[in-house]
Amino acid sequence: MYTISTQLVFHISHAHSLKDKRQVRRSIIDKTKHRFNASIAEVATQDIIQTLTLGIAVVSGESHRARESMDEIIRFIEGHIDAELISIEED
């Protein structure tokens, strides 16, 4: 069994309140969970209005499939979020 986890940090320039940030977070988490079999959650920077930090975990029986899944999830998120991806940190 292979597990890959990644932390993505986004800058949400149009967020002026935590409510704005929650809307972006909720949208991307719901879309990602609906499309992929992966765990995703906000893992840090909860009180910083314009910064969203998401943690993603993928489990697979094959290491290359886990890597392919994670890459596909990151591409999907980049294409479906109204924010700038500023950091990708893999464990």
Image: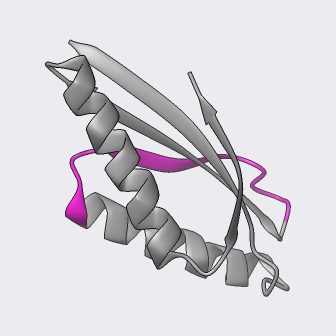
Q: Quadrant of the C terminus?
A: top right
Q: Residue furthest top?
A: 1
Q: Is residue 1 above or below residue 47?
A: above
In the image, 43 versus 82, the foreground residue is: 82
In the image, 11 versus 41, the foreground residue is: 11
Is 7 left or right of 78, judged from the image as shown? right
Is 4 left or right of 10, judged from the image as shown? left
- Within the image, what quadrant is residue 38 found in? top left
Q: Quadrant of the N terminus?
A: top left
Is 5 left or right of 7, judged from the image as shown? left
What is the magenta range? 35-48
What residue appears at the point 56 percent right and 69 percent down from the top-left corner?
25
In the image, 14 versus 48, the foreground residue is: 14
Q: Is residue 75 above or below residue 68?
A: below
What residue appears at the point 27 percent right and 16 percent down from the top-left corner?
2
What residue appears at the point 40 percent right and 35 percent down from the top-left corner?
57
Colouring rule applied to residues: one colour
What residue appears at the point 50 percent right and 49 percent down from the top-left corner?
41
Residue 31: % across, % down:
34, 71
Residue 27: % across, % down:
46, 76
The question of residue 77 being in magenta is answered with: no
